[in-house]
Amino acid sequence: MIEGIIVLVAALLVLIVLHVTEDALQVLRERTGSAQGARMTWGKRITWALLALVAAHFFVPKGLLEPAPPPPPPLPQAALFNADSLWSGADTSRLASLNDSLEAVIRYGRELIANTSHYLGQQGTVMRNTNGLNCQNCHLDAGTRPWGNNYGAVWSTYPKFRARSGGLESVAKRVNDCVERSLNGTALDTNGREMRSILTYMEWLGTGIARDEKPKGTGIVDMAYLDRAADPEKGAAVYLTKCSSCHGKDGQGMLKADGRTQQYPPLWGPLSYNHGAGLYRLSRFAGYVKNNMPQGATYASPQLTDEEAWDVAAFVNSQPRPGRDLSADWPDISKKPVDHPFGPYADPFTASQHKLGPFGPIAAHYKLNGTKSSQTGKP
Ligand code: HEC
Ligand code: HEC
Protein backbone atom coordinates (compact mmCIF):
# COMPACT_ATOMS: atom_id res chain seq x y z
CA MET A 1 0.00 0.00 0.00
CA ILE A 2 2.63 2.55 1.13
CA GLU A 3 4.98 1.24 -1.59
CA GLY A 4 2.34 1.90 -4.24
CA ILE A 5 1.83 5.45 -3.02
CA ILE A 6 5.60 6.09 -3.00
CA VAL A 7 5.96 4.83 -6.64
CA LEU A 8 3.02 6.99 -7.72
CA VAL A 9 4.42 10.10 -6.03
CA ALA A 10 7.88 9.42 -7.50
CA ALA A 11 6.44 9.03 -11.00
CA LEU A 12 4.52 12.28 -10.64
CA LEU A 13 7.69 14.03 -9.46
CA VAL A 14 9.63 12.80 -12.53
CA LEU A 15 6.84 14.06 -14.80
CA ILE A 16 6.86 17.47 -13.13
CA VAL A 17 10.66 17.71 -13.42
CA LEU A 18 10.49 16.81 -17.14
CA HIS A 19 7.74 19.37 -17.65
CA VAL A 20 9.63 22.15 -15.87
CA THR A 21 12.96 21.50 -17.65
CA GLU A 22 11.18 21.50 -21.00
CA ASP A 23 9.56 24.83 -20.21
CA ALA A 24 12.94 26.21 -19.17
CA LEU A 25 14.53 25.01 -22.41
CA GLN A 26 11.70 26.64 -24.35
CA VAL A 27 12.35 30.00 -22.65
CA LEU A 28 16.09 29.68 -23.30
CA ARG A 29 15.46 29.01 -26.98
CA GLU A 30 13.19 32.10 -27.19
CA ARG A 31 15.85 34.28 -25.54
CA THR A 32 18.67 33.07 -27.80
CA GLY A 33 16.38 33.30 -30.85
CA SER A 34 16.95 29.71 -31.86
CA ALA A 35 14.20 27.78 -33.57
CA GLN A 36 11.38 26.41 -31.51
CA GLY A 37 11.57 22.61 -31.12
CA ALA A 38 8.56 20.39 -30.96
CA ARG A 39 7.28 19.57 -27.47
CA MET A 40 7.75 16.06 -26.19
CA THR A 41 4.74 13.80 -26.55
CA TRP A 42 3.10 12.37 -23.45
CA GLY A 43 4.12 8.91 -24.53
CA LYS A 44 7.80 9.88 -24.52
CA ARG A 45 7.46 11.63 -21.18
CA ILE A 46 5.95 8.58 -19.51
CA THR A 47 8.63 6.31 -21.02
CA TRP A 48 11.35 8.53 -19.58
CA ALA A 49 9.58 8.56 -16.23
CA LEU A 50 9.40 4.77 -16.15
CA LEU A 51 13.06 4.46 -17.16
CA ALA A 52 14.03 6.86 -14.36
CA LEU A 53 12.03 4.82 -11.87
CA VAL A 54 13.63 1.54 -12.93
CA ALA A 55 17.07 3.16 -12.61
CA ALA A 56 16.23 4.63 -9.21
CA HIS A 57 15.07 1.23 -8.01
CA PHE A 58 18.69 -0.01 -8.04
CA PHE A 59 19.85 2.84 -5.83
CA VAL A 60 17.20 2.48 -3.17
CA PRO A 61 18.85 0.75 -0.19
CA LYS A 62 17.51 -2.73 0.41
CA GLY A 63 15.08 -3.12 3.26
CA LEU A 64 14.03 0.52 3.23
CA LEU A 65 10.47 -0.41 2.59
CA GLU A 66 10.40 -3.56 4.66
CA PRO A 67 8.55 -3.39 8.01
CA ALA A 68 10.75 -2.63 11.04
CA PRO A 69 11.91 -5.79 12.89
CA PRO A 70 9.97 -6.51 16.11
CA PRO A 71 11.60 -5.08 19.29
CA PRO A 72 13.80 -7.57 21.18
CA PRO A 73 12.04 -9.41 24.02
CA PRO A 74 12.35 -7.69 27.44
CA LEU A 75 15.41 -8.58 29.51
CA PRO A 76 14.75 -11.14 32.20
CA GLN A 77 14.60 -9.73 35.73
CA ALA A 78 18.14 -10.03 37.02
CA ALA A 79 19.98 -8.91 40.10
CA LEU A 80 21.48 -5.45 39.76
CA PHE A 81 24.49 -6.06 41.91
CA ASN A 82 27.55 -8.24 41.99
CA ALA A 83 29.77 -9.57 44.72
CA ASP A 84 31.57 -6.22 45.04
CA SER A 85 28.75 -3.72 44.68
CA LEU A 86 26.03 -2.80 47.13
CA TRP A 87 22.52 -4.03 46.45
CA SER A 88 20.27 -1.13 45.50
CA GLY A 89 16.97 -2.70 44.58
CA ALA A 90 15.48 -4.12 41.46
CA ASP A 91 14.93 -1.92 38.42
CA THR A 92 11.25 -0.90 38.39
CA SER A 93 11.32 -0.38 34.62
CA ARG A 94 11.53 -4.17 34.35
CA LEU A 95 8.10 -4.43 35.94
CA ALA A 96 6.68 -3.70 32.50
CA SER A 97 7.82 -7.10 31.27
CA LEU A 98 5.61 -8.92 33.77
CA ASN A 99 1.97 -9.61 33.08
CA ASP A 100 -0.37 -6.76 33.94
CA SER A 101 -2.02 -8.26 36.99
CA LEU A 102 1.31 -9.23 38.60
CA GLU A 103 2.69 -5.78 37.87
CA ALA A 104 -0.33 -4.18 39.53
CA VAL A 105 0.07 -6.29 42.69
CA ILE A 106 3.78 -5.45 42.97
CA ARG A 107 3.09 -1.76 42.43
CA TYR A 108 0.42 -1.77 45.13
CA GLY A 109 2.82 -3.54 47.50
CA ARG A 110 5.47 -0.91 46.82
CA GLU A 111 2.90 1.83 47.30
CA LEU A 112 1.91 0.40 50.70
CA ILE A 113 5.57 0.50 51.79
CA ALA A 114 6.09 4.06 50.54
CA ASN A 115 2.78 5.62 51.63
CA THR A 116 1.63 3.33 54.41
CA SER A 117 0.01 6.18 56.29
CA HIS A 118 -2.27 7.09 53.40
CA TYR A 119 -3.72 3.55 53.36
CA LEU A 120 -3.32 2.26 56.93
CA GLY A 121 -2.64 5.38 59.05
CA GLN A 122 -4.77 7.33 61.52
CA GLN A 123 -7.02 8.46 58.67
CA GLY A 124 -6.18 5.60 56.31
CA THR A 125 -8.31 4.95 53.25
CA VAL A 126 -8.16 1.13 53.53
CA MET A 127 -7.74 0.49 57.28
CA ARG A 128 -6.80 2.46 60.37
CA ASN A 129 -4.51 0.06 62.17
CA THR A 130 -1.19 1.93 62.47
CA ASN A 131 0.37 5.03 64.04
CA GLY A 132 0.87 6.93 60.78
CA LEU A 133 4.51 6.14 60.06
CA ASN A 134 5.38 4.83 56.60
CA CYS A 135 7.45 1.67 56.28
CA GLN A 136 9.62 3.80 54.02
CA ASN A 137 10.43 6.22 56.86
CA CYS A 138 12.79 3.52 58.13
CA HIS A 139 13.15 1.29 55.02
CA LEU A 140 14.26 4.10 52.72
CA ASP A 141 13.30 4.32 49.04
CA ALA A 142 10.66 1.63 49.48
CA GLY A 143 13.27 -0.64 51.00
CA THR A 144 15.94 -0.38 48.30
CA ARG A 145 18.55 2.12 49.55
CA PRO A 146 22.02 0.66 50.29
CA TRP A 147 22.48 0.61 54.09
CA GLY A 148 19.07 2.30 54.32
CA ASN A 149 17.53 -0.69 56.14
CA ASN A 150 16.57 -2.22 52.80
CA TYR A 151 14.78 -5.48 52.06
CA GLY A 152 17.53 -7.04 49.91
CA ALA A 153 17.98 -10.06 52.12
CA VAL A 154 14.36 -10.63 53.13
CA TRP A 155 13.17 -13.09 50.51
CA SER A 156 16.44 -15.00 50.46
CA THR A 157 16.75 -15.51 54.24
CA TYR A 158 13.16 -16.04 55.48
CA PRO A 159 11.58 -18.17 56.78
CA LYS A 160 14.27 -18.25 59.43
CA PHE A 161 14.66 -18.96 63.09
CA ARG A 162 14.61 -15.82 65.20
CA ALA A 163 15.60 -15.76 68.83
CA ARG A 164 13.18 -12.91 69.61
CA SER A 165 10.15 -15.16 69.10
CA GLY A 166 12.05 -18.40 69.64
CA GLY A 167 10.54 -19.85 66.48
CA LEU A 168 10.64 -20.08 62.72
CA GLU A 169 9.37 -16.81 61.23
CA SER A 170 7.82 -16.28 57.81
CA VAL A 171 8.14 -12.99 55.95
CA ALA A 172 4.48 -12.28 56.82
CA LYS A 173 5.24 -12.71 60.52
CA ARG A 174 8.26 -10.39 60.19
CA VAL A 175 6.20 -7.76 58.38
CA ASN A 176 3.55 -7.92 61.11
CA ASP A 177 6.32 -7.55 63.72
CA CYS A 178 7.05 -4.13 62.26
CA VAL A 179 3.33 -3.33 61.97
CA GLU A 180 2.83 -4.12 65.67
CA ARG A 181 6.06 -2.56 66.95
CA SER A 182 7.49 0.06 64.59
CA LEU A 183 4.00 1.14 63.54
CA ASN A 184 2.60 0.39 67.01
CA GLY A 185 -0.46 -1.11 65.32
CA THR A 186 -2.52 -4.24 64.95
CA ALA A 187 -1.38 -7.04 62.64
CA LEU A 188 -2.51 -7.27 59.03
CA ASP A 189 -4.58 -10.27 57.96
CA THR A 190 -1.98 -12.65 56.52
CA ASN A 191 -4.32 -13.59 53.67
CA GLY A 192 -5.58 -10.08 53.00
CA ARG A 193 -4.88 -8.08 49.85
CA GLU A 194 -2.47 -5.70 51.61
CA MET A 195 -0.23 -8.39 53.11
CA ARG A 196 -0.25 -10.43 49.91
CA SER A 197 0.78 -7.37 47.90
CA ILE A 198 3.61 -6.51 50.31
CA LEU A 199 4.88 -10.11 50.14
CA THR A 200 4.70 -10.14 46.34
CA TYR A 201 6.68 -6.90 46.23
CA MET A 202 9.33 -8.36 48.53
CA GLU A 203 9.52 -11.56 46.50
CA TRP A 204 10.02 -9.49 43.36
CA LEU A 205 12.72 -7.41 45.10
CA GLY A 206 14.48 -10.68 45.94
CA THR A 207 14.60 -11.90 42.34
CA GLY A 208 18.10 -13.02 41.39
CA ILE A 209 19.27 -13.34 45.01
CA ALA A 210 20.08 -16.94 45.90
CA ARG A 211 18.69 -18.67 49.00
CA ASP A 212 20.63 -17.55 52.14
CA GLU A 213 22.54 -14.93 50.16
CA LYS A 214 22.81 -11.54 51.88
CA PRO A 215 23.87 -8.95 49.30
CA LYS A 216 26.23 -6.24 50.55
CA GLY A 217 24.56 -3.13 51.87
CA THR A 218 21.32 -4.79 53.02
CA GLY A 219 19.73 -3.94 56.34
CA ILE A 220 21.41 -1.66 58.89
CA VAL A 221 25.15 -1.40 59.37
CA ASP A 222 26.63 -2.91 62.55
CA MET A 223 28.71 -0.12 64.09
CA ALA A 224 31.70 -0.64 66.35
CA TYR A 225 30.81 -0.27 70.03
CA LEU A 226 31.98 2.79 71.93
CA ASP A 227 34.35 2.19 74.85
CA ARG A 228 32.01 4.21 77.05
CA ALA A 229 28.28 4.31 77.65
CA ALA A 230 26.33 6.37 75.11
CA ASP A 231 25.45 9.75 76.63
CA PRO A 232 21.88 11.12 76.36
CA GLU A 233 23.05 14.61 77.39
CA LYS A 234 25.60 14.84 74.60
CA GLY A 235 22.92 13.35 72.36
CA ALA A 236 20.53 16.17 73.30
CA ALA A 237 23.03 18.68 71.93
CA VAL A 238 23.41 16.69 68.71
CA TYR A 239 19.63 16.49 68.42
CA LEU A 240 19.19 20.23 68.81
CA THR A 241 21.74 21.16 66.14
CA LYS A 242 21.25 18.32 63.62
CA CYS A 243 17.76 16.88 63.96
CA SER A 244 15.28 19.28 65.53
CA SER A 245 14.89 21.46 62.42
CA CYS A 246 12.87 18.66 60.81
CA HIS A 247 11.73 16.35 63.60
CA GLY A 248 10.85 19.27 65.89
CA LYS A 249 12.26 20.40 69.23
CA ASP A 250 9.52 18.30 70.82
CA GLY A 251 10.33 15.30 68.59
CA GLN A 252 6.83 15.19 67.15
CA GLY A 253 7.78 15.77 63.52
CA MET A 254 5.65 17.79 61.16
CA LEU A 255 2.51 17.07 59.14
CA LYS A 256 2.26 17.74 55.41
CA ALA A 257 -0.09 20.41 54.14
CA ASP A 258 -2.79 17.72 53.69
CA GLY A 259 -2.92 17.51 57.51
CA ARG A 260 -3.09 13.70 57.27
CA THR A 261 0.38 12.41 56.47
CA GLN A 262 3.80 13.34 57.79
CA GLN A 263 6.44 15.43 56.13
CA TYR A 264 8.82 14.60 58.97
CA PRO A 265 8.01 11.59 61.13
CA PRO A 266 7.92 11.86 64.94
CA LEU A 267 10.86 10.34 66.85
CA TRP A 268 9.07 9.90 70.16
CA GLY A 269 5.66 10.41 71.77
CA PRO A 270 2.33 8.64 71.11
CA LEU A 271 2.72 8.38 67.31
CA SER A 272 6.23 6.91 67.34
CA TYR A 273 7.51 3.31 67.41
CA ASN A 274 7.04 1.41 70.67
CA HIS A 275 9.48 -0.14 73.17
CA GLY A 276 9.49 -3.43 71.30
CA ALA A 277 10.61 -1.97 67.95
CA GLY A 278 14.00 -2.61 66.37
CA LEU A 279 14.94 1.09 66.50
CA TYR A 280 14.51 1.07 70.26
CA ARG A 281 17.74 -0.92 70.39
CA LEU A 282 20.61 1.55 70.44
CA SER A 283 22.74 -0.30 67.87
CA ARG A 284 19.88 -0.32 65.32
CA PHE A 285 19.08 3.37 65.82
CA ALA A 286 22.74 4.42 65.71
CA GLY A 287 23.44 2.33 62.60
CA TYR A 288 20.36 3.67 60.84
CA VAL A 289 21.05 7.36 61.51
CA LYS A 290 24.80 7.06 60.91
CA ASN A 291 24.21 6.30 57.21
CA ASN A 292 20.92 8.09 56.62
CA MET A 293 20.38 11.12 58.86
CA PRO A 294 20.13 14.09 58.78
CA GLN A 295 18.10 13.60 55.59
CA GLY A 296 20.55 13.72 52.69
CA ALA A 297 23.27 11.75 54.44
CA THR A 298 24.23 8.43 52.80
CA TYR A 299 26.67 5.64 53.60
CA ALA A 300 29.04 7.31 51.13
CA SER A 301 28.70 10.74 52.75
CA PRO A 302 27.66 10.33 56.39
CA GLN A 303 27.17 13.49 58.41
CA LEU A 304 27.45 12.12 61.94
CA THR A 305 30.51 10.78 63.72
CA ASP A 306 30.05 7.35 65.33
CA GLU A 307 29.93 9.02 68.74
CA GLU A 308 27.23 11.45 67.63
CA ALA A 309 25.16 8.58 66.22
CA TRP A 310 25.36 6.57 69.49
CA ASP A 311 24.72 9.62 71.69
CA VAL A 312 21.73 10.90 69.71
CA ALA A 313 20.33 7.35 69.81
CA ALA A 314 20.67 7.41 73.59
CA PHE A 315 18.88 10.76 73.77
CA VAL A 316 15.96 9.87 71.48
CA ASN A 317 15.44 6.45 73.06
CA SER A 318 15.31 8.06 76.52
CA GLN A 319 12.20 10.05 75.58
CA PRO A 320 8.66 8.81 76.27
CA ARG A 321 7.03 6.46 73.75
CA PRO A 322 4.34 3.76 73.63
CA GLY A 323 5.06 0.53 75.51
CA ARG A 324 4.35 -3.06 74.63
CA ASP A 325 4.08 -6.33 76.49
CA LEU A 326 7.41 -7.99 75.73
CA SER A 327 7.06 -10.93 78.11
CA ALA A 328 6.94 -13.45 75.25
CA ASP A 329 10.08 -12.08 73.59
CA TRP A 330 13.36 -13.98 73.82
CA PRO A 331 12.05 -17.08 75.55
CA ASP A 332 15.73 -18.06 75.86
CA ILE A 333 17.01 -15.03 77.78
CA SER A 334 20.64 -15.87 77.01
CA LYS A 335 19.85 -15.01 73.38
CA LYS A 336 18.91 -11.40 74.13
CA PRO A 337 21.00 -8.94 72.12
CA VAL A 338 23.52 -7.00 74.24
CA ASP A 339 21.46 -3.83 73.70
CA HIS A 340 18.04 -5.22 74.65
CA PRO A 341 17.15 -2.86 77.49
CA PHE A 342 14.73 -5.12 79.39
CA GLY A 343 15.65 -7.91 81.80
CA PRO A 344 15.74 -10.52 83.08
CA TYR A 345 19.21 -11.35 81.81
CA ALA A 346 21.38 -14.41 81.85
CA ASP A 347 24.36 -12.19 82.74
CA PRO A 348 25.40 -9.95 85.66
CA PHE A 349 25.14 -6.61 83.79
CA THR A 350 22.57 -3.96 84.71
CA ALA A 351 19.56 -2.99 82.61
CA SER A 352 21.14 0.46 82.25
CA GLN A 353 24.30 -1.01 80.74
CA HIS A 354 22.13 -3.09 78.37
CA LYS A 355 20.42 0.12 77.32
CA LEU A 356 23.33 2.55 76.94
CA GLY A 357 26.49 0.43 77.06
CA PRO A 358 29.38 0.05 77.17
CA PHE A 359 28.39 -3.05 75.23
CA GLY A 360 31.86 -4.48 74.64
CA PRO A 361 32.12 -6.19 78.05
CA ILE A 362 28.66 -7.77 77.64
CA ALA A 363 29.60 -9.17 74.23
CA ALA A 364 32.88 -10.43 75.67
CA HIS A 365 31.03 -12.09 78.57
CA TYR A 366 28.91 -14.16 76.23
CA LYS A 367 31.86 -15.14 74.10
CA LEU A 368 33.73 -16.20 77.25
CA ASN A 369 30.82 -18.31 78.36
CA GLY A 370 30.61 -19.84 74.92
CA THR A 371 26.94 -18.94 74.55
CA LYS A 372 25.93 -18.77 70.92
CA SER A 373 24.00 -15.59 70.66
CA SER A 374 23.17 -12.77 68.31
CA GLN A 375 24.43 -9.86 70.37
CA THR A 376 26.00 -7.94 67.56
CA GLY A 377 23.80 -8.90 64.63
CA LYS A 378 20.13 -8.89 64.01
CA PRO A 379 17.69 -9.81 66.74
C1 HEC B 1 10.35 3.02 62.96
C2 HEC B 1 11.13 2.32 61.98
C3 HEC B 1 10.50 1.21 61.16
C4 HEC B 1 9.32 1.22 60.47
C5 HEC B 1 8.33 2.36 60.35
C6 HEC B 1 9.19 -0.08 59.84
N1 HEC B 1 10.27 -0.85 60.14
FE1 HEC B 1 10.66 -2.74 59.44
N2 HEC B 1 12.39 -2.77 60.50
C7 HEC B 1 12.88 -1.74 61.29
C8 HEC B 1 14.10 -2.17 61.94
C9 HEC B 1 14.95 -1.33 62.86
C10 HEC B 1 14.34 -3.50 61.51
C11 HEC B 1 15.47 -4.42 61.93
C12 HEC B 1 16.68 -4.17 61.09
C13 HEC B 1 17.90 -4.89 61.62
O1 HEC B 1 17.82 -5.53 62.64
O2 HEC B 1 18.95 -4.78 60.98
C14 HEC B 1 13.24 -3.83 60.61
C15 HEC B 1 13.12 -5.05 59.94
C16 HEC B 1 12.16 -5.36 59.01
C17 HEC B 1 12.13 -6.57 58.21
C18 HEC B 1 13.18 -7.68 58.27
C19 HEC B 1 14.40 -7.28 57.48
C20 HEC B 1 15.47 -8.33 57.46
O3 HEC B 1 16.31 -8.29 56.54
O4 HEC B 1 15.51 -9.18 58.36
C21 HEC B 1 11.01 -6.50 57.42
C22 HEC B 1 10.55 -7.54 56.42
C23 HEC B 1 10.35 -5.25 57.72
N3 HEC B 1 11.07 -4.58 58.69
C24 HEC B 1 9.19 -4.81 57.13
C25 HEC B 1 8.54 -3.63 57.45
C26 HEC B 1 7.27 -3.22 56.89
C27 HEC B 1 6.50 -3.99 55.84
C28 HEC B 1 6.96 -2.03 57.45
C29 HEC B 1 5.71 -1.21 57.27
C30 HEC B 1 4.45 -1.94 57.50
C31 HEC B 1 8.04 -1.68 58.36
N4 HEC B 1 8.97 -2.67 58.33
C32 HEC B 1 8.12 -0.48 59.07
C33 HEC B 1 12.32 -0.50 61.46
C34 HEC B 1 11.10 -0.10 60.94
C1 HEC C 1 16.22 17.77 56.68
C2 HEC C 1 15.26 17.10 57.51
C3 HEC C 1 15.74 16.04 58.48
C4 HEC C 1 16.74 16.15 59.42
C5 HEC C 1 17.61 17.36 59.72
C6 HEC C 1 16.76 14.89 60.11
N1 HEC C 1 15.82 14.04 59.62
FE1 HEC C 1 15.38 12.16 60.30
N2 HEC C 1 13.99 11.96 58.85
C7 HEC C 1 13.66 12.92 57.92
C8 HEC C 1 12.71 12.36 56.98
C9 HEC C 1 12.06 13.08 55.82
C10 HEC C 1 12.51 11.01 57.37
C11 HEC C 1 11.67 9.99 56.64
C12 HEC C 1 12.46 9.49 55.46
C13 HEC C 1 11.62 8.97 54.33
O1 HEC C 1 10.44 8.70 54.53
O2 HEC C 1 12.16 8.85 53.21
C14 HEC C 1 13.31 10.82 58.57
C15 HEC C 1 13.34 9.62 59.30
C16 HEC C 1 14.02 9.44 60.47
C17 HEC C 1 13.94 8.25 61.31
C18 HEC C 1 13.08 7.03 61.07
C19 HEC C 1 11.61 7.29 61.20
C20 HEC C 1 11.12 7.55 62.59
O3 HEC C 1 10.30 8.47 62.76
O4 HEC C 1 11.49 6.86 63.55
C21 HEC C 1 14.78 8.46 62.36
C22 HEC C 1 15.03 7.52 63.52
C23 HEC C 1 15.39 9.75 62.18
N3 HEC C 1 14.91 10.32 61.04
C24 HEC C 1 16.32 10.30 63.03
C25 HEC C 1 16.98 11.51 62.79
C26 HEC C 1 18.05 12.01 63.61
C27 HEC C 1 18.58 11.34 64.86
C28 HEC C 1 18.45 13.20 63.06
C29 HEC C 1 19.59 14.09 63.49
C30 HEC C 1 20.89 13.47 63.56
C31 HEC C 1 17.59 13.45 61.91
N4 HEC C 1 16.72 12.40 61.78
C32 HEC C 1 17.65 14.58 61.14
C33 HEC C 1 14.14 14.22 57.87
C34 HEC C 1 15.17 14.71 58.62
Image (spheres, helix red, strand yellow):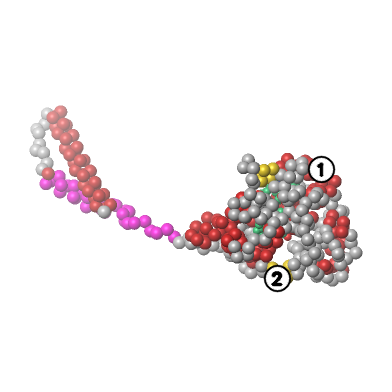
Q: CA distance from mark 2 to mark 1?
A: 42 Å
| Percent of width and height locating residue 62 | 31, 56
Q: Is the residue marked 2 within 8 Å of ligand 1, measured from its CB?
A: no
User: Picture quarter containing residue 274?
Assistant: bottom right
Q: Secondary structure at mark 2?
A: strand
Q: Is residue 85 visible?
A: no
Residue 168's disc is 2
- Amino acid type shown at disc 2: Leu
| Percent of width and height locating residue 159 | 67, 69
Q: Is residue 336 left or right of residue 130?
A: right
Residue denoted by label 1: 237
Q: Which residues are magenta?
A: 43-72
Residue at image point 16% right, 31% down: 27
| Percent of width and height locating residue 13 | 23, 43
- Amino acid type shown at disc 1: Ala
- Using the image as rendered, state which of residue 323 and residue 42 is in the foreground: 323
Is-magenta flag for residue 122? no
- Using the image as rendered, state which of residue 286 and residue 118 is in the foreground: 118
Among numbered discs 2 and 1, the one appearing first in the sequence: 2
Is-magenta flag for residue 50? yes
| Percent of width and height locating residue 31 | 15, 28
